[in-house]
Amino acid sequence: MLDKIAQFGHRGVSTLQSIGSSGVFLFTVFSRSLNFRKLWPALRVQLHFVGVLSCLIIVVSALFIGMVVGLQGYHTLEKFGASSQLGQLLALSISRELGPVLSALLFAGRAGSALTAEIGLMKATEQLASMDMMGVDPLGRIIYPRFLAGLISLPTLSLIFSAVAVYGGYFIGVQWLGVDGGSFWSNMQAAVDFRLDVLSGIIKSVVFAFVVVWIAVFQGFSCVPTAEGISQATTRTVVYSSLSVLALDFLMTAMMIGGW
Amino acid sequence: MQTNLVELANLTFSRKGRCIFDGVNMEVRRGKITAIMGPSGSGKTTLLKLIGAQLQPDSGTVLVNGTNIHRLSRKALYQARRKMGLLFQSSALFTDLSVFDNVAFPLREHTALNAAMIRDIVLMKLEAVGLRGVANLMPAELSGGMMRRVALARTIVLDPELMMYDEPFTGQDPISMGVLVRLIKRLNQLLGTTTVIVSHDVEETCSIADYVYLIAGGRLIGQGTPQELRQSAQPHIHQFMHGEADGVVPFHYPAKPYTEDLLDA
């Protein structure tokens, strides 16, 4: 019994330690001075790796999710004779919730896990140590560009997701099920408020980007430099990121609905 | 100018409660090749990391060029490391960069040289290790020996004052091994670099070393010129230098008797 309590306590302490060291890690990364001449080439490569290469999965997922929401929404709204409100339903649910949350979850699975594995492998093959020995700070040279690339990419991907998903819903609702195109777009335009709906979605995706990339690079940088250690760190990235995104979504939604 | 480029005094270091070094004293003479040898797991690589300040000792000092390397600020330490080169056992090449870009990396980071100058220096260093022809290949396309030589070219590209080699001969075929031995010696002579080699390859290391330290069990068990150590009658030194399987340093990790272990199953 006492052993179990001690074990529980030990786990709690190590979790707190890990949160503390990730905070110190974040502070250290952002305290590194910037040299744009050296940062830009690395940032450009990472924007391609983290952002551009994630586009396909985001676009395809958005298209299908938009189509599903369109289909479900139409059949529900039709029962009340309100199928012309489909555009409103789609735009609000996607811009406020589905766009930021699902793009963040997909981003964590695709780019977050790749970042962790890449940094972990660099650690295991002593690339980070050799850089450090050359007098080049790995936090500034490796971590910082990846962090910035994630912060830029995810909100952009989230906007792409929302736009494509709305078109997916339009394709199902208007082109297939016969909702009037004019009322679809005009109801959407009348119902969606830029500040309350679009901007709040963007704010959410910026927060999600920050958390997902933070978790991903920290897990990679602090992993045990073995095959098993990297695999565990990659799993942790996906699990922690997904749970954090869902929990933060609830918190931010509550704050936004409550008028901040 | 000081005679010793590196001085270790009463160095103590432990990891996870296990003592790796207990009061080690060592001196590395400027312009000479100093070898640190010892059995696997004796902390040779750890010692290089302590000299490079990638690890902090529990107590004792490491002076590099008369400066306590562990007391430097991050900026000053990075400045000091530009004069040091460490050839990692795993080569540690950047897998996303070509051979050329790997060797050019320190120049691009630390100098304001133009592209033409960088190209000339990189090709010069690759020529020195005999691999100018692979400049455009990726590290994954090279053999282990070639990777080690590219890593060597990258390490010497800033003409360091102190070169540290971590097990440079491990896993090399006889040709690569011979090439590496000659390269290390030639670089030491031509560039006047102070060299520290960590290895357990007695023959190759002794053929080029000016002075040898033997470490085992966290302590220095012997030191001297390769000739002196070969002729030493001290059991620890004799066993290691002549590669005897069992002796003062046991071959077997401590365990209960073999028969007892088998019968327990």
Image (cartoon, rainbow, N blue to C red):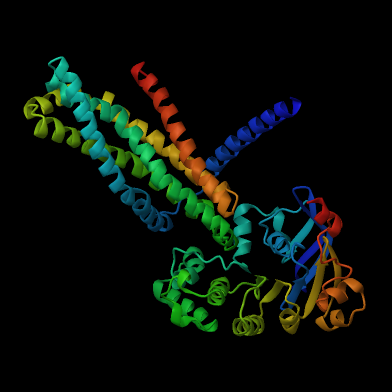
Residue A37 located left or right of residue B264: left
Is residue B2 in view from this perspective? no
Is residue B115 in view from this perspective? yes
In the displayed structure, would residue B177 be above or below residue A2? below
Image coords of residue A199 (percent x, y)? 29, 29
Near-viewer residue (A174 or A258): A174
Q: Quadrant of the N terminus of chain A?
A: top right
Query: Residue A80's image quarter?
Result: top left
Residue in view at x 42 percent, y 74 percent: B137
Residue A189 located left or right of residue B193: left
Residue in view at x 56 percent, y 55 percent: A123
Q: Residue furthest right?
A: B233
Query: Residue A127's image quarter?
Result: bottom right
Near-viewer residue (B26 or B109): B26
Query: Residue B187's image quarter?
Result: bottom right
Q: Quadrant of the C terminus of chain A?
A: top left
